[in-house]
Image (spheres, rainbow, N blue to C red):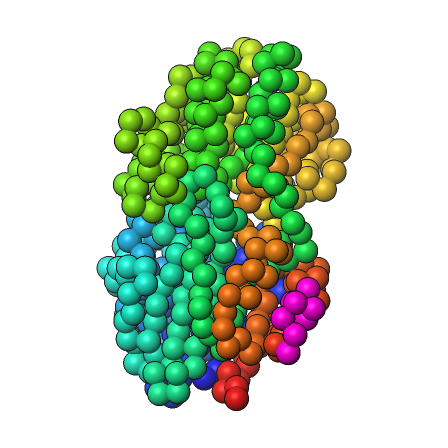
Amino acid sequence: MRLKFLGAAKTVTGSNFFLTGENTGLMVDFGMFQGKPEEVGLNNVKPDIDFSKLSAVLLTHAHLDHCGRLPLLAHYGFKGPIFMTEATKALAELVLHDAAKIAKEAEARSILYTDKDVEVILKQVLLIDYDKQFDVGDFRVTFVDAGHILGSASVIVKERSTGKKVVFSGDLGNTPEPLLSPTHFVNKANIAVVESTYGDETHGPRKEEADLAKIIKKAETTNGTVLIPSFSIERTQELLYIFDQLKKEGKMDNKTPVFLDSPMAIKATMIFKDFPVLFSNRLKDQIKTDDPFDFPGLVVCDTIEKSKQVKNYNGVKVIIAGSGMMSGGRVIHHAINYLGDPNTQLVIVGYQAEGTLGREILDGKSSINIWGNWINIKAKILEIKTMSAHADQGQIISWLKKIDGLEEIALIHGEELPRLVLSEKIHLDLQGVKIVLPVVNQEINLDIQ
């Protein structure tokens, strides 16, 4: 077996790997590069592989940096199967059509594919249940629940002739978390290809409900605005769930409006409700009698007109808007309107990639330029790290320790510092295991002894 790293290698985004056996080639993920201009430019570069040897694609989950280039496969002549879970397909359809729409609205040079390309590639999707084995040529494949977002999977690939196993972690969840079932452990593998997004951090105790209660109380006292850039998938649903709990518990005024201003997040929430079998036990209990994503004061901005009206609402308010890294979407309009106000609290609740507006603000920029508008940031900038959907260093190590027979680990999906720190920690905790820190287009031989 050989494995080529085509993305998310010394970078966070652009997840893409090519695993080859004697007669079979498997691509794991085909995600979009985001953030730095030099990385975004890689989206237009055809991966350096022989597409005639590509037998199938395995998709870990529906985040754009894992699925965002799938429609390009049709351009490259690939007509084979694309395996994913049912929930991942529902979300990926939403994500890919949204990406095509955004590109169409932007400059022509940024268009990678159209809605028609999305429809073509979706016809090649085959649905896979968790923990059910299936064969693709030389390989036997199993998807297990990664606990990251709805439908997310870690993928175990076994070479049928030798029994050697490679596991691709995908993105591992921040277990336990309120909405989803826990991350599934992998019992046996020889090689692990593992994310390292938060490889140098520990999230700390989960207290986001208490943190948000404190933030809301301050806003209610000052008639201020709470602006939350949020990822449409998972993070927004978690926020809605928390605000539902805060209002039920009397920790937030029922009259305080929460504006959900993201068409994609609105649709993702509807999809979320279609898969209760994937929910945590606590959420399964609640949905028997109550909608955990609806509450008094929720205002769904499903049209651009409603979005524009938000700024005319005087008094305390919460705005949840995309995109999560402030790299586009309706949150940009709200940033122009509210970041210059000292009564605004900007609450960062997810990872901010290098090169994004969210990262610049989080790193302490005092003024920013949005569409030619210079804004002196007077808002209070806050970050709630425990809401991350990614495993932290300790959770990654725990996941690796459960794998029997592990001989080699490749650290991917992380910036260089987190990878290096995690690598040192693994050296200490899993002695004798070889560690690889791959770069884009590096290929390694997996015929280990």
Q: Is residue 45 above or below residue 272?
A: below
Relative horizontal placement of residue 394, taking residue 81 as reference (left or right): right
Picture layout, residue 346 above or below residue 13: above
Q: How many tags in the picture? A: 0
Highlighted range, magenta = 425-432
Q: Position of residue 180 (x, y in %)?
A: 41, 45
Name which residue lies at 58% across and 21% down. Answer: 216
Q: Is residue 135 left or right of residue 382?
A: left
Q: Quadrant of residue 117 in the image?
A: bottom left
Pick the residue in front: 323 or 22: 22
The secondary structure making up most of the magenta span is helix
**Residue 181 appears in the figure:** yes
Residue 142 included in the magenta stretch of the image = no
Picture coordinates of residue 162 (x, y %)? 39, 87
* Above-or-below relation of 375 to 424: above
- Residue at 50%, 87% in the rendered image: 447
Q: Give the residue displayed 62% in from the left and 46% down from the top.
A: 203
Q: Is residue 303 above or below residue 41?
A: above
Image location (x, y in percent) of residue 303: 37, 26
Q: Nearer the viewer, residue 433 or 316?
A: 433
Foreground: 411 or 292?
Answer: 292
Quadrant, the N terminus: bottom left
Q: Residue at x 54, y 30 (%)?
A: 209
The reply to whether residue 17 is visible in this rendering is: no
Q: Quadrant of residue 165?
A: bottom left
Q: Position of residue 441 (x, y in %)?
A: 56, 74
